[in-house]
Image: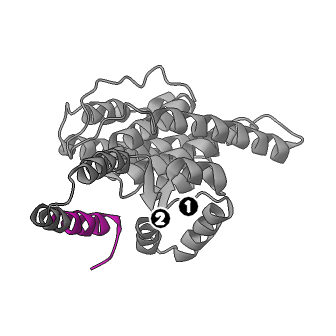
């Protein structure tokens, strides 16, 4: 059995229960246990938060996706910044202290079901930001379906159909005569990504393709200094997305979600990049 954080807490509570019984039999004062109980409640409330992960969980994620070296680099960056706290690693520290910021942070959230709704919202947000680049004949309403799914207003079968429609639109674009425009293709790919059933994967891929589309579009009619302008736009969008994640993913009133989609009714239409 892996000795992770949860197992350690089960062991601690078991040991503590034995000590309570022992103290009753020996007549030890009870005030000590009232104090420790209060401390434990506060500690467990903090540990139930959705704003962090652990070293073992991150290692498992990067091993699962076949990138163990990426984990070593990430963990080295966290340690160098002095941000590892009793095996607890905060997503905000990953976001601020590692290369690949947004994408790598989203990767680290893959096993955190409490963030599923936020990850889906972020995926749709990214796709919405580049929807305007898609030629009219290739536009679909699949993002509306994803929003309904987030609110619990449609079944998973509707998401699967939405993904099929998004892929069909991308295939049709790639199959048309002529070369097409790369930023349009990436905008369509971002919409496809937003329909993926795994929330973190949807967020990661939609973020990546939409970022490419935005940066490519920013230099369409530029003849000189294209690389510098591309990188400047990249840095600008990454900064805005980091701020969005910090403000929305780690807010204090973040709900703890069940397996069902959130039905908060949050609208994405007014979200800007």
Q: Residue furthest bottom?
A: 1
Chain part drawn in magenta: 1-17
Q: Secondary structure at mark 1?
A: loop
In the rendered structure, does residue 3 fall within the stretch colored magenta?
yes
On screen, residue 254 versus residue 73, left or right, reads left
How is the protein colored in the picture?
one colour
x and y percentages locating residue 249 in the rendered image: 45, 39
Can you tell which mark lies on residue 186? none
Which residue, as the protein is rendered here, is positioned at the far front?
27
Answer yes or no: is residue 175 visible.
no
* Coordinates of residue 253 in the picture (x, y in percent): 37, 30
Q: Quadrant of residue 256?
A: top left
User: Front-most of 229 and 2?
Assistant: 2
CA distance separating discs 1 and 2: 6 Å
Residue pointed to by mark 1: 84
Query: Where does residue 84 sit, x and y in percent of width and height?
Result: 55, 61
- The answer to whether residue 2 is magenta is yes
Question: Extreme left residue here?
Answer: 25
State left or right for residue 156 relative to residue 130: left
Per the picture, the main secondary structure of the magenta-coloured stretch is helix
Residues at circles 1 and 2 in contact by the CB criterion of under 8 Å: yes
Q: Please say if 108 is above or below 209.
A: below
* In the image: residue 83, left or right of residue 27: right
**Secondary structure under badge 2?**
loop
Q: Nearer the viewer, residue 130 or 85?
A: 85
Q: Quadrant of the C terminus?
A: top right
Q: Dot 1: within a 10 Å radius of its alpha carbon, few (fewer than 14), some, or many (20 or more) residues?
A: some
Farthest residue toward the right? 224
| Residue that badge 2 annotates | 87
């Amino acid at each position: 059995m892996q000795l992770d954080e949860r197992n350690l807490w089960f062991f601690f509570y078991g040991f503590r229960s034995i000590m309570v019984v022992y103290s009753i039999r020996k007549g030890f004062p009870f005030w000590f246990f009232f104090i420790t109980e209060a401390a434990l409640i506060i500690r467990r409330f903090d540990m139930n938060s959705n704003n962090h992960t652990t070293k073992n969980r991150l290692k498992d994620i990067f091993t699962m996706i076949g990138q163990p070296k990426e984990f070593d680099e990430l963990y080295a960056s966290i340690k160098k910044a002095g941000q590892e706290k009793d095996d607890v690693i905060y997503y905000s520290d990953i976001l601020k202290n590692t290369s690949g910021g947004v994408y790598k942070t989203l990767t680290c959230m893959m096993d955190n079901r409490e963030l599923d709704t936020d990850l889906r919202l972020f995926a749709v947000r990214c796709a919405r930001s580049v929807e305007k680049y898609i030629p009219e004949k290739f536009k679909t309403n699949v993002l509306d379906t994803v929003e309904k799914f987030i609110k619990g207003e449609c079944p998973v079968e509707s998401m699967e159909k939405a993904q099929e429609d998004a892929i069909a639109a991308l295939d049709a674009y790639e199959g048309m005569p002529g070369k097409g425009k790369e930023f349009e293709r990436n905008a369509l790919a971002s919409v496809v990504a937003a329909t993926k059933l795994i929330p973190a994967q949807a967020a990661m891929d939609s973020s990546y393709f939409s970022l490419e589309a935005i940066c490519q579009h920013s230099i369409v009619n530029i003849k000189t200094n294209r690389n510098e302008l591309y990188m400047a736009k990249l840095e600008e969008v990454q900064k805005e997305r980091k701020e969005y994640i910090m403000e929305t993913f780690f807010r204090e009133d973040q709900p703890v979600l069940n397996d069902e989609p959130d039905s908060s009714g949050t609208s994405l239409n007014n979200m800007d990049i």
